[in-house]
Amino acid sequence: MPDFDTLLDKYQHDPQIKDLIVRIMSSSAPSEPNARGQTIDKAKVIEVHEYMKQELQKLVEYIQKSPSRSKLDVKNVTLTAQAFVGAKVQKKFGLTSEDVESAVIYNHKDLAVDPDFVRVNIAIQTIMNQLIVPQFVM
């Protein structure tokens, strides 16, 4: 996970990156799926979310072992984790965060009642909550 530390260190004071993060965080979720999202089926959405869960878990474990964890800003760690996992998903599956989000919207009715999707989403939320615990103390 040295890539994660490198990203944190490299961009923590970059005003352009901060501006982009603010824009990303303030934009609302799309109400309609994009064209690419409509081509992604329920099984692929679940597969992508399983991968996201695995990558987030690795990241949390890495942060927990880091001697500098108490110095990290929780908000920056959370945003960086989201960007880091998004980049991993894009590299492995060729899907952007918008594509995945659109696929979730497009497949919403099926996903809402799918126990595997519900389970993986709860797991992702639990892992993300571990990132926001003050000082990353577990």
Image (cartoon, grey):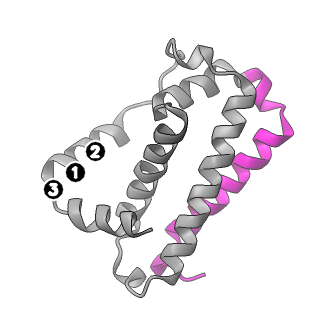
Q: Disc 2 marks which residue? A: 22
In this view of the protein, which residue sits in the foreground, 73 or 58? Answer: 58
Image-quadrant location for residue 104: top right
- Image coords of residue 117 (percent x, y): 76, 39
**Residue at 43% from the left image edge and 53% from the top image edge:** 84
In this view of the protein, which residue sits in the foreground, 44 or 118? Answer: 44
Labels 1 & 3 near each other (Cβ < 8 A) = yes
Secondary-structure class at tag 3: loop
**Amino acid bearing label 2:** Val
Labels 1 & 2 near each other (Cβ < 8 A) = yes
Q: Any magenta on residue 26?
A: no
Q: Disc 3 marks which residue? A: 14
**Residue at 47% from the left image edge and 23% from the top image edge:** 30
Q: Going by the picture, which residue comes out furthest to the left?
A: 15
In this view of the protein, which residue sits in the foreground, 55 or 32? Answer: 55
Magenta-colored span: 109-138
The quadrant of the image that shows the N terminus is: bottom left
**Residue at 36% from the left image edge and 33% from the top image edge:** 27
